[in-house]
Each structure stands twice: as C-alpha cells, then as structure tokens.
Amino acid sequence: MLTETTEPTIVVEGDKNSRFPCVEQPTRVALHCNGYYLWCKRNGKLICRRKRNDKDEFFLRYDDAGTLAIQHHKFKGLLTALSTTLADGTIERSAKCFASEEDEKKITALEEEKKEEKEGGGEEEDGANAAAAAAAAKSEEDKKEEEEEEAEQEEDQEPPEFQPDDQKWCFVRGAADSINANAIIMKSISTGLNLGIDDNGQLRFGDDDAPPRKLYWSIECVTGELCFMSNPRLKSQTRCDMSGLLNMDANMKGWEVFRFMEAGHGFVKISSWMHSQWLLCSTKDGLVDTCSHAESFKDYRPSEEDDAKSDSPSAETFRCSKWAIEKNPNGEGVIIRSKTHGRLLCVRDNFELRTWHPDDEKKKAAAAAAAEADEDAAKIAPDDGRKSNNWQSFTSSMRDSMKASFEDARKKMAKKDEPIVPESETTVWYLEAAHSQNYYFLSLNMQDPDAQAKSVGPGLEVTPNLRKNTKIEIIRENENITKLCIVKTDTKPAKNQFLACETDGSISLLDVRNAAEAEWIMQKSAEQEGCTVFKSVATGRYLSMRPIVEEPRKRESTTEKLSNMTNSVFGKEKEVLETLHGSETLEATAAWKLDPCMPRAVRSDKIKT
C-alpha cells in the first residue's frame, strides 16, 4: 500500500527499500448499511448498532465458484440465512452466525484461559487511573448490552437446521452513481434475497425492488498497515490517547502506532491502533482532530451552486477523514494530504497537529492587516457614552480566556528550550513499521498442531518458555544480505551483537557487524508454509537448533537429587535443553516462524474491562 514511503533517517542501517512492512493479516472488514454496523454476539445473534466495536469485524472467505462465506473474526460463526415455516404456512426469514464444534471448543478454552489470567492478576499493563475513569464513563447502553448478552447465553436453544448453501453469499455491485459507486448488495445464494437493515436497525431480507439505502452495504476494511508517524524535523511521533486527543511526543510505544486502511481510489483512513475507534480527520480551516468510524462515511459533494463558492457552510464544517499518501517531491519521506481540503498534515508550535496550505501565510498577513485597521478605527471613533452589550462582552472575554489558557497549557507540554519550527517545514513525514523490524523467532512442529512452540531466548538457548524469548532485529542490506541483531540491554550502555555461524556449526554473538560469519541469506521455507529459513553466507549452514550435550558430573547436588526424585514420582520427564546450531542440511528445525514484536501499551478495550 505504501510502497513509496521511506524510513526515518534516525535508522540509517540496512537497505531501507527492503524493510518489511507491518501488515495485519488476514484482512478483516466491517459491514455498514443504512447508518448501522452489523454486529455478532457470542451466541451468534446478529444485531445492528451505529457505533464501531470488535464485534462487527468479519472475514470474507471466497471460493472458486465466486461465492463467499462471511465469518465473524472473534466468535468464528458463519453468516447463515435461515428460513422457518410458521404454523400459517408463511416463511420467516432471519440471519444468524453459527460456528463449528471445533471452533466452539477453541473459543471456550480461550475464554477460560483469559478468565483465569484476569482472576490471577496476570495483567501487567499500567494505567489504573485510566481504567477507573473508563469504567465510570461506560454508557448505560453498553451495560444493557452486556446484561442482555449474559441472559441470552444462559438460554439453551437448539440450533436450527440449515444447508451448506445457506452459508454462501454473493456480492453484487450497486448502482453506478456518485453516491453508491462503492456499495454492494449482499445476496443469499439459497434464497436469492438480499440482506439489508431497515430504518429501525433491524435485519431484513428483501428483493431487488427494496429502497437502495436499506440494501446497499459499504465494506470497510478495518485492518491495514501499522506505522509510526514520525516527523523528522521535530524528531517526534504522533500520539493518540484513549479520548482521541492528538499531540506529538518522543515515545515509540503502542499509543504512537497508527493503522493505515484502504479507503478506495488511492486514499486511506488513518486510525489509532490501540484506540481504534478514533480516526484522523481535518477541517477546511486546518484543524486536525479525531472522529468516529460512522462519521468517516460522510463525504462532501458540493452542489453546482457551491462549486463557485468555496466558503459554503457545508464545506466549512465538513471533517474529512480520507488522506492521500504521496511521495515527497523534494527528497525522502512522504506528505499526507487531505482528500477534500487539499491541505498537508503538519505540526504547529512543535506540538499541535494541523494542516497547512501555501496560501495560509497570505491569509494570515491579510487578517493581521484587517485587525490592525479595525483597532485604529476604534481609536479614532468617538465615545458616545453607551456601553456595549454586557453579554457579548462577557462571552467574548470568556472565549479569549479559555483559548489563552489552552495555548499556555499546550506550550508547557511542548518541548522546552527549543525553537518553534514553522508549519511549512513540518509537512514531511516518515512512516516506520510498528514492529521496528524486531521479531521473535519461533520453532513450530507443523506435523503436530498440539506440539508446544519454542522460541530463541537469552543466551541463544531455545526454550518452550515463551516469556523468555529474545527480540531479534532483522537488518536487510544490499545484495540480499541479512544481519540478525540482538540488543544486549544488560550492559551499560546497551550494545548490538550479531548472530554468527562458525565452520563447526556453533552459533555465537559478535560485536563486529561487518564480519563475514554474521551474513545470512533469508529465504521462504519450501517445506513449511509461513516459515523462514536463514542460510549462512560464509559456511552454507542453516540456522537450526540441537540438544545441549551436558558433560556427566561426578556427584549430583542435593537440589538435583530432590528434583530428579520429584520428577520420577510425578512422572515428569526431564526437560531437554536446546541451543542454536548451524546444520549442514535443511532440517525441519531450520524453519522459523517470525512473530512481529509489537510495542506494549494499554488498549481501550482492556481499560474498559
């Protein structure tokens, strides 16, 4: 999606063109019709709500015949068209989601595991004050929905009978006009009817003659590319908190990660990753704020009368949430331009997000001249002795006072002792992948799905304890050369060390980056899908693992004796320790699953629970 973007000059090592993006897979979508989002509850019941939630995200799974299945991403249920014959012979149409028995078992086990972690105090994330504030702010509607869902889960209902075709759907393109150009009709294969939402927020089936607004669906992609939005001129990142407030700071954590989602015709929507309910939007006067997903569906289309009037009320108040990511014509980086207003994303006073246009300087000069002229006229005009409107004077002074207080607070939060950078110099941005090229290396047994995963831990051992895993940075260089870097944080200052393979197959850490032993070739695994193989350039060996050979000891310590006795009593086998090793042949243990290392932070849905 963002193939022309480059990385910050702060990270100068490696080939920037071969850096890996951080893309969410598989793609999830939200289905929006007649002002409502389609939600699915834990028991498979479908409801319609005007707001966004993780309950409204679905997978679209196409088959070779051109039809598709619509599966809920969280509860794994497939959207099903149901037909029930009533006592009077009429057929009642409804829709519900049904998950397979295997998926139900997995979801139940996952819910029980999360419940145990919550009861055991396993949450390590900070933000207790924010959690208390969010819990107090929970709306009555949210509480009512939770109570209804709990009551519905207690009901024991027999699932109705349905055929495989009842879970197959077909998307039909909507009318080719300016409003519904991207809309689709969701048609059931088994019934031939279209699923829609009426004005009261209820799901309904109808034929092709039903009003378009009740049948036309917008498919909104809710996954995308995760990036830090860094401003190289200020050396800071954009940040969004749980209330939707935007500012700049020097951190690179979860609240500084943004999701770039395709919005059609080359434009994207930008939402916060941790607080996904907020999207970046901008107004005609340069204000940058956040809006909801429902508001982001609005699109400004000036009428013929408004084409000649750029200052129409609708244009003044419209908040555009679509952006164009364009390559910087003057060098590295990208510029982020508002679709409707054509203004460029920038930073004012080193802290506040705004949009900038070359004509802004002329308008500021004209406004300053007009204000000076008004002030001079007020001094010349004679005083007639009448007092001004007290209410207007009071509200005006209050507005000015609030604005001044806000400006003072904002400037105090900005970086001190640094000169203010003009807005025109902050329009260039760098988009860096949210994982910062750091990965956990996992070893998986693809033949046995129940086998425990292992990861590379400290000291180059391979351990089943995933909490001891070590972050490894993948540095891509020219000529397909890859370096594997581990940051040693236990030394002061922290230093970078690079994985190297010796001729005898031993794996070591070198402080020298340019050593030939530290060069690897990164390839896709032909045997195990989704895995990666690393081959040493110097020795031709593959990065793998082998058991640690322990030398026999003359005497066992008392602790070791007790441990061995305990293991024998309870039937526990002694854990086999393994370490990284360079194998001469391409073994199954040489295939590694690369798990992106994402920054940790408090997510909105975690705070509210």
Image (cartoon, grey):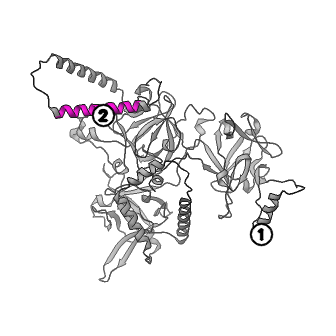
Q: Where does the image place residue 341, in percent across and percent down from the top left?
A: 33, 36
Extreme residue toward the top, this view: 380
Residue placed at 82% from the left, 43% from the top?
Answer: 503
Residue underneath mark 2: 402
- Give above or below for 550 relative to 420: below
Examine the residues drawn in magenta and state their main secondary structure.
helix
- Residue at numbered disc 1: 569
Q: Secondary structure at mark 2?
A: helix
Give neighbour class at mark 1: few <14, some 14-19, many 20+ (Cα, 10 Å). few
Q: Amino acid at mark 2?
A: Met
Q: Is residue 400 magenta?
A: yes
Q: Residues within 10 Å of mark 2 (few under 14, many from 20)?
A: few
Q: CA distance from mark 1 to mark 2?
A: 73 Å
Residue at x-position 35% and y-position 68%: 193
Q: Which residues are magenta?
A: 391-411
Residue 222, percent from left and from top: 45, 52
The spot of residue 241 in percent (x, y) is: 44, 43
Q: Secondary structure at mark 1?
A: helix
Instruction: State the image coordinates of residue 516 (x, y, percent, origin top left).
Output: 76, 36
Is there any visible trace of residue 244 in the rendered image?
A: yes
The answer to whether residue 236 is above or below residue 522 is above
